[in-house]
Amino acid sequence: MVTGATSGIGKEAAKMLASDGARVIIVGRNQEKCQQTVKEIITETKNKNLEYLLADFQYLGEIRLLAEKFHTKYDKLDVLINNAGVYLKRRETTADGRELSFSVNYLAPFFLTNLLLPALKKSDSARIINVSSLSHLGAKIDFDDIFSEKSNQHPKFAYRRSKLALIMFTYELARQLKNSNITVNAVCPGGVATALWKTNNDLQTKATRLIVPLLKTPQQAAGLLVYLAESPEANNISGKFFALKKHSRFRNYNYKNTISKSSPESYILPDQKKLWQVSKELVGFG
Ligand SMILES: NC(=O)c1ccc[n+]([C@@H]2O[C@H](COP(=O)([O-])OP(=O)(O)OC[C@H]3O[C@@H](n4cnc5c(N)ncnc54)[C@H](OP(=O)(O)O)[C@@H]3O)[C@@H](O)[C@H]2O)c1
């Protein structure tokens, strides 16, 4: 299952997995885009084992329904790629008033992963890949202000915190799943030429937009996700952060040896545990 597979890195990852013969479920929020993506991937790869499930990740109810549909239709899940993400131009909130990027980029994959764990446990060897970002460096989770109401409201800060939260979740989950059949890792795909750069308007994004055509392609970035999903080498690696630190499309990328250090904040154990507890309460899980 690949979330955010209607565009950019997720779409390329779904295509590559389909090319390799996998049965792929793409997750998107827009039915037309999902149908179009499925059609495109089937045409290009000749693999007809492709389906889609719908959910807008700002709505917890839709995520719950997505998981229920999955459990009704399928028995087990081998790979979950939590890739969907937004980088907003201005602060936006969900229907229940929560900051949107933290909700979509972090709370949604936290919830979805927990709901799908029973199916992942049925796989012989399951892998979870969380698409984070090096932009988490320097971010801190403020447990008194999870949805950035009191702090600087520019969405780039909420984006960075969402990506930090995703890494902390990865480390905590890896510990909980130690000695199980499931591995979980986080990745940063590095700078990639995708629609993500079209939205935000901070200075760094504006500058990056000028060089987007030089950034690595979605295929090059998706290669890391597929490496982690398929490679026998990655079979026993869990609780790590992989980053493609170079950004140019004119390089060859070797996905092996891309294990990196995440920020010092991401390794603070009591914070990881506290975040897990807070997240559980926020999504009403368990
Ligand atoms: N591009 C980069 O340089 C870069 C760098 C570091 C990390 N990342 C991360 O890589 C991941 C993929 O991003 P991308 O660069 O491929 O961008 P993208 O082309 O904009 O793809 C984002 C995907 O997320 C989906 N999505 C957005 N909001 C959603 C919601 N509310 N519910 C469900 N799905 C939603 C989008 O659906 P629609 O097609 O309907 O919009 C799209 O499929 C993100 O997590 C991003 O933070 C990207």
Image (spheres, rainbow, N blue to C red):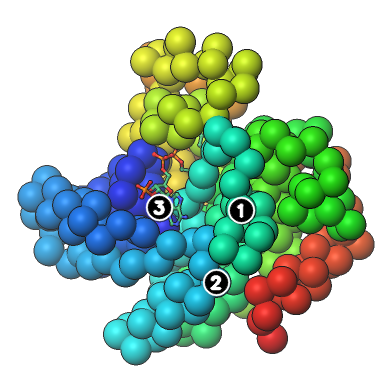
Q: Amino acid at mark 2?
A: Leu
Q: Residue drawn 34% across and 67% down? A: 54
Q: Which residue is mark 3?
A: 4
Q: Nearer the viewer, mark 1 or mark 2?
A: 1
Q: Quadrant of residue 244?
A: top right
Q: Quadrant of residue 177?
A: bottom right
Q: Nearer the viewer, residue 147 or 219?
A: 147
Q: Earlier in the sequence, mark 2 or mark 3?
A: 3
SS class, disc 1: loop
Residue 1 shows in the view: no
SS class, disc 3: loop
Residue 225's place in the image compared with 261, above or below, is below
Q: Which residue is mark 2?
A: 60
Q: Position of residue 231 (x, y in %)?
A: 43, 52
Q: Quadrant of residue 151?
A: top right
Q: Which residue is mark 1?
A: 93
Is 251 situated left or right of 270 in this image? left
Mark 3 residue CB less than 8 A from any atom of ligand 1: yes
